[in-house]
Amino acid sequence: MKSVVAVLGVLLFAAVTSAHVLELEPDSFDDIVNGDRFVFVKFYAPWCGHCKSMAPAYEEVGDAFSHISDVVIAKVDADKHRELGSRFGVSGFPTLKYFPKGATEPEAYSGGRGAEDLVQFINEKSGFRGRIKKQPSDVVVLDESNFDQIVMDENKDVLVEFYAPWCGHCKSLAPTYEKVGNDFKNEDDIVIAKMDADKYRGIPSRYDVTGFPTLKWFPKSNKDGEDYSSGRSEKDFVEFINEKTGAKRLPGGALADDAGLISVLDELAKAFADEGERESVLAKAEAEAAKHDSKYASYYVKVMKKIADKGNDFPATEIDRLERILAAGNVKADKLDSFYIRRNILKQF
């Protein structure tokens, strides 16, 4: 009974801390690796670069078998728990071993370290069918048939990652790059793209791609391509693209507090506070709004009319309503920008 409780405790803790990959420690290892199930274990060290590169793929493997109770995907910090690592002959990182059902002694794994390689191997050895969950991506995949059509479009600013599937640094960058694609997905004239430069070698050679990943920026004004040499965090990418394009994105994809604002209408919004000048200010705002292409220019006028009709508390009340809707997280992606910009405009009153 104690053993069952211990196992349940480990499973509950691991589910909270690392998705569907169990973090095993010396006092829990034998409760999990007891022959009852097929167990695949990664022995790693937190400082190991190869371990870090492999981590996203290993999480995918955990997800692939999350619905199969007889297969456990686990990991052990063998730098912290060296005795446990030495017990199984671990001398480098990452070391991968699997314990077939019915066995408590491991067998070495020496195959590929991509998610698909690992899942295929575990399927063959365990007899179960784990499947990698394909996540929707906002990063455009380029090949020889669409590169010029997308990248050379003078109406688009395009960031391209030239990568190789086997490249550890590319694998490490991949989750961040996916976030950047998501951050700019609502920008019609900004494209975040990638190309397998190992498979399609002709096009990368045009741009002197000799290592991976190589990042090139193709602005509307220069389709010869410019080297991207800024940092590789999500924040670094977002700041670079904002600076180059005038976009107003934040990491995570939300719009900044000054997104959608029109300075001349901002001044008129503030002037509208003088009730004696409202008729004149409204007329000026209508004239200015008519000059602008932005569909949100007319929203300044709409707010002025709402204030005149419903009172001075309208902006604060409407901001509160919009922020409650945003906080609930139920707004469709293509509607989010409208909510953020309307909130920004309301704050000018």
Image (spheres, helix red, strand yellow):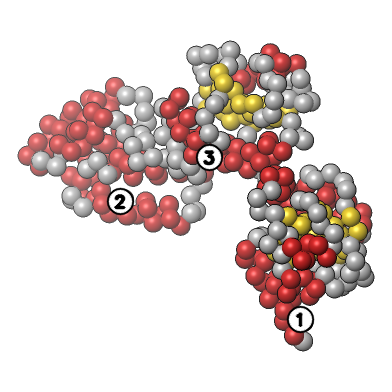
Residue under the image location 43 percent in, 55 percent down? 327
**The N terminus is located in which quarter?**
bottom right
Q: How far from the left and from the top, in percent, is residue 281?
A: 15, 33
Residue 138 occupies quadrant: top right
Q: Earlier in the sequence, mark 2 or mark 3?
A: 3
- Say which of marks 1 and 2 sits in front: 1
> Is 325 left or right of 10, judged from the image as shown?
left
* Element marked by disc 2: helix
Disc 1 crowd rating (10 Å Cα; few below 14, some 14-19, many 20+) is: few
Amino acid type, callout 1: Val
Front residue of this view, candidates 168 and 157: 168
In the rendered image, which residue does mark 2 sit on? 318
Residue 45's place in the image compared with 289, above or below, is: below
* Residue drawn at 80 percent across, 45 percent down: 113
Evaluate whether residue 104 shows in this view. yes
Mark before the other along the chain sequence, 1 or 2: 1
- Circles 1 and 2: CB atoms closer than 8 Å: no
Q: Position of residue 58 (x, y in %)?
A: 74, 52
Amino acid, disc 3:
Glu
Asked whether the residues under the numbered discs 1 and 3 touch, taking CB atoms below 8 Å apart as contact, a structural biologist would say no
User: Which residue is drawn at the image coordinates 68% and 20% (left, top)?
Assistant: 209
Q: Is residue 230 above or below residue 304?
A: above
Q: Which residue is mark 3?
A: 234
Q: Earlier in the sequence, mark 1 or mark 3?
A: 1
Q: Quadrant of the C terminus?
A: top left
Q: Position of residue 154 (x, y in %)?
A: 54, 15
Label 2: few (<14), some (14–19) or many (≥20) C-alpha neighbours in 10 Å: some
Q: Nearer the viewer, mark 2 or mark 3?
A: 3
Other-residue count near label 3 (Cα within 10 Å), few / some / many at <14 / 14–19 / ≥20: many
Q: CA distance from mark 1 to mark 3?
A: 42 Å
Res. 4 mark: 1
Q: Quadrant of residue 260?
A: top left
